[in-house]
Structure formats: structure tokens, C-alpha cells
Amino acid sequence: MSDLSTLRALSPEAFAALGHQGIAYVRRTEETGEQGPASIYAIHSAAGERIGAAPSRDLAFAAIRQHGLEPLDAH
């Protein structure tokens, strides 16, 4: 079986666990707060769990690096 075939055969949970210890993803999203809708940058673990948020991409990346993880953009 090729490496690509092996990856395609992984369950979504197993795929999410790859790199779980060292990666966090940043995704721009809209949230509604007391002052109305606002754009934020949500921070997610490799397993998809939301673990934080920041008002800018740069701050989200800095927070991730402060915790010893490598930030990546999620689309």
C-alpha cells in the first residue's frame, strides 16, 4: 500500500491525531458579542477542539508559539 493510500484509509479521528502534539490551527470567524458581530481568529487543536481565540492573526500565531506549538492557517 502506498503512503497516499494509507492516508486516505485513515479515519477522520486518526488523521486529526497526526501531529496532534505540535500543531494548532487558526481560522478567521465571525462571532456576535455585546457590541455586535466581530471578526476573530479562533485557535483549534489538531483534533479540531477550539482552544482559544485572538483579535488578530498575528496575536493568534504569537499565542500558539508561546505555548510551544507550530501555528498553521485553516481554510
Image: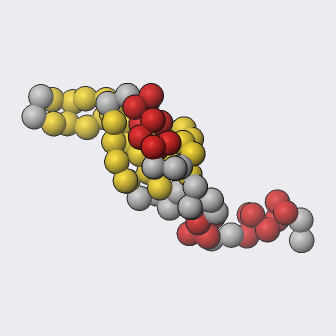
**Residue occupying the far right of the picture:** 1
User: Up-down: is 43 above or below 32?
Assistant: below
Query: 20 or 47, which is in the foreground?
Result: 20
Number of marks in the rendered image: 0
Q: Nearer the viewer, residue 70 or 1?
A: 70
Query: Quadrant of residue 8 in the image?
Result: bottom right
Please provide percent x and percent y for residue 63. 41, 40
Which residue occupies 12% across, 28% down? 35
Q: Please tell me in which quadrant of the rendered image residue 49 appears.
A: bottom left
Front-lying residue, 22 or 25: 22
Q: How is the structure coloured here?
A: secondary structure
Residue 74, can we see it? no
Which residue is rendered at x = 53% and y = 49% of the image? 69
Between residues 31 and 67, which one lies in front from this camera angle?
A: 67
Residue closest to the far left: 34
User: Which residue shows up at 89% across the image and 65% down it?
Assistant: 2
What residue do we see at 15% from left, 36% from top? 33
Q: Where is residue 66 drawn, in percent x and y? A: 45, 43
28 sits to left or right of 4: left
Please determine whether, in this image, residue 8 is positioned above or below residue 54.
below
Decide if residue 52 is on the left or right side of residue 15: left
Quadrant in which the N terminus is drawn: bottom right
Residue 21: % across, % down? 56, 61
Residue 68 in sight: yes
- Decide if residue 7 is on the left or right side of residue 54: right
